[in-house]
Image (cartoon, helix red, strand yellow):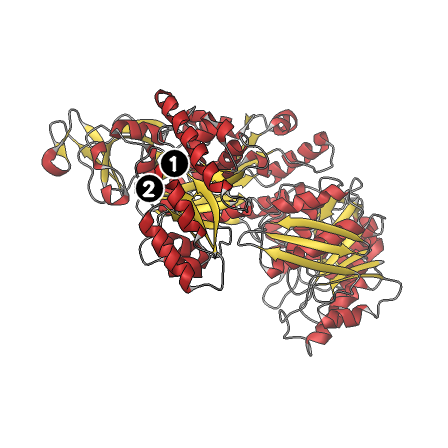
Amino acid sequence: MFAYSVSDICSITQSTCVGNPSSRIDSVYIDSKTIPSHASAVFIAIVGAKHNGHSFISELYHRGVRNFWVQLHADYPLFDDATYIISEHPIHALQLLMAHYRGQFSIPIVGITGSNGKTIVKEWLYTIAKHYTAIARSPRSYNSQIGVPLSLTSLDTHHTIGLFEAGISQPNEMSNIELMLKPSIGIFTNIGDAHQEHFVDIEHKVAEKMKLFASVSTLIYCKDYELIHKHAQNLAHTILHAWSCTDNSADIFVTYSSTKTHTTITLRYYAELFSFDIPFCDKASIENAVHCCIAGLVLELPKQFLRHFETLPQVAMRLEQKSGKHSCTIINDSYNSDLQSLTVALQFLSQQNQHPNKTLILSDLKQTGTDKQTLYSHIASLIQSYGISKCIGIGHDVQTYLKPHIPKGLFFNRTIDFLEAYPTLQFHNEAILLKAAREFEFETIAKKLEFQTHQTVLEINLNAILYNLQYFRSYLDARTKVMVMVKAFSYGSGSYEIANILQNNKVDYLAVAFADEGIELRNAGITVPIVVMNPETGMMQQIFEHTLEPSIHNWFALEEFKRYCSSHPEAIHQCHIKIDTGMARYGFAPSEITQLVEELHAITNCSIRSVFSHLVGSDDSQFDAFTEQQISTFVQSSSHICAQFSYPILRHILNSAGIERFSTYQFDMVRLGIGLYGISATHENNCMHISTLKTFISEIRTMPAGTTVGYSRKGSVKRDSRIGVLPIGYADGLNRKLSNGVGTVIVNNTEVPIIGNICMDATMIDLTDVDAEIGDEVILFGKDLPITRMAEKLETIPYEIITSVSRRVKRLYYFE
């Protein structure tokens, strides 16, 4: 742990002391607004072009600070019970001290520099390595002449690796940083035009940045940056891990393939081959990930470290500060959760002087490598030092180790316990810091606290989509293919967004109703095979131009398909054949199969990809006999077709309900439709609800008994009531039949009725029995108000409701 006596500091930095040379220093501050008033903190008074830190000494003294690091010959007040470290150049003296402190550790130090990506590489490397080793790292972008020495104070005896970034804005700065860091492993991320103004040219800047690696044993960089590669050759006794995406002869050769949402990266690392996925597809992220992968290999992390690339986070570069409810300010720090970042966040919180009170909501800190008694004792000291007026802890560790130090704090086992207690907690005119490990899902707390910029939105849970996909796959043999229906705007959920996640999760086919839907997906970059279930007249040209595959379900469609194949003999054109086994909607009758086969044989340049049919009542046991009859008819008809062709033809008849209830008949492929979107034929809880339609209260009116609400005076007010207005109406897809108490919504966990007639753009609800205010969220359907209940009230099916949500309602897609 960083700790020196004042006399030792003076000896190391060739400074002098006025005051108590035995004073102990364990933390260093340069910002007068963030320094706590504990006895072992020292304030460094920096003189800049437009400020003089010495002018804050009197104020800090009266706030309880007693240690000051000052500049020789500067003007500052002398207090009898304060201690002063006097240096000719305090920042240079601090650098000398931290070089001495760094010298106490023999662990690998990774030094990271470059024009861009330093912080992301550092944070991603931390993310993948923290599971295997205790890591010290610079907080956020602390990479300057002052930031680096402050970062080094985080080094402690339990750490086995250090990750520190270094940045320069002018010549002759990097030598000072190298003196402090003495990295053993270097990463040069890239080179560009950033901070170019003080350098002769880019090569000059490369040469200056390369000084960080004067004594490294290993350097990692991309040799495709020719200037970096050129200057790396000048490093003596350094192993160069130079990778390339263009030079196949490089010792480390990188290839990658990207979709819209993720990238698969393959490294030929000398004689070995490694492959991993990242949830990004931009070139900068690919470059950053490669640097992290090579660093992981150099650090000899267990090979399973590669799996952590799949969940690399977006790196937030700053604390998020938002307006909160009840005149609060919310500081949401999801950047990381360790002692050092907590200290930085508390410093930021302490600056929120627009509020009289400051609140910390803190979860357990994970994988710190520090003894928990020591860790939470130190956290308690920080809480006291920064004047935190309210502390709320969530998790086992904070309850066990922090609570004894904070007897007036509030503590909960889980986030959900806090949320349940939230209505009884009073937050008003305070600054609230949220600091948590990811697993505690503090975003749910943030949503409670933040003043939302509201709008009506249909939220789509992509995790639920994948869960439901896996649920239905669990019924299938490994060989069975899956076609997913994304027609009708993916049942109202959004075509491309759903199609994209399905493509990334290896579904075999997508199906749309009309050609325009398929063309839209192709134009958006969807490449998986797409079937057009109802090809319109005159669309064959566009269908094949966009590599779509038509379903042929009547003689007219067959004739149009035949004409197209005849006029385009240069290619083989694929199609799908539908048989009508009882739906009486689309498809060839079983009696027409022989003639159909003859007609298909006459088309020499066509290929039948599949033969299929549609079940009528697979979700209802009263129709099971008819379902079995349909399947029997399909077996006979499809077998006859398949037997007449020399190539394999897929067969499929099961829909979502069929997969659950008749999985024996899965044949070669199944068609997953409404089940993907959260509706199960066997039990409501089998699937996850994917959609939540929500809006907010835009207005509240107090109405006396005897008055009416809405068009035609249908909403009769029986008692003095509070009526809320919602900015959603039948033009948004809210069925007008839900008017006058038929439909309900959820406000603050309470179900309340719709009152009066639903309008085109607005709906009124009765808030008399719930504590609610303008801006509160309103759920129209979702997990706690299932869409199936709305369907029952409307005497319809969930399909109709979810596909009726207007496109003017914004779709919001998220991963939990």
Q: Amino acid at mark 1?
A: His
Can residue 701 be seen here? The reply is: yes
Contact flag, marks 2 and 1 (Cβ < 8 Å): yes
Can residue 418 be seen here? The reply is: no
Counting from the top left corner in percent of width and height, residue 126 is at 69, 47
**As rendered, which of 189 and 435 lies closer to the eye?**
189
| Dot label at residue 586 | 2
Indicate left or right for 131 with 420 as reference. Answer: right
Q: Find numbered disc 1 in the image and state the secondary structure of the residue it sits on.
A: loop
| Gap between marks 2 and 1 measured at Cα | 9 Å
Point 73% across, 75% down: residue: 204
Counting from the top left corner in percent of width and height, residue 378 is at 68, 36
Q: Please report whichever mark, 2 or 1, sits nearer to the chain's N-terminal start.
A: 2
User: Which quarter of the rendering shows the N terminus?
Assistant: top right
Q: Amino acid at mark 2?
A: Tyr
Point 64% across, 36% down: residue: 365
Q: Residues within 10 Å of mark 1 (few under 14, many from 20)?
A: many
**As rendered, which of 241 and 620 lies closer to the eye?**
620
**As rendered, which of 610 and 673 lies closer to the eye?**
610
Counting from the top left corner in percent of width and height, residue 436 is at 58, 38
Indicate left or right for 386 with 586 as reference. Answer: right
Counting from the top left corner in percent of width and height, residue 447 is at 44, 39
Write down the quadrant of residue 625 in the picture.
Answer: top left
Write down the quadrant of residue 723 in the picture.
Answer: top left
Q: Find numbered disc 2 in the image and state the secondary structure of the residue it sits on.
A: loop
Taking the view exactly as shown, the residue that stands out farthest to the top is 622
**As rendered, which of 225 and 647 lies closer to the eye?**
647
Q: Which residue, given by chain and number where applicable, does mark 1 sit on?
A: 614
Q: Is residue 695 above or below residue 142?
A: above
Q: Residues within 10 Å of mark 2 (few under 14, many from 20)?
A: some
Taking the view exactly as shown, the residue that stands out farthest to the bottom is 200
Q: Is residue 670 above or below residue 99?
A: above
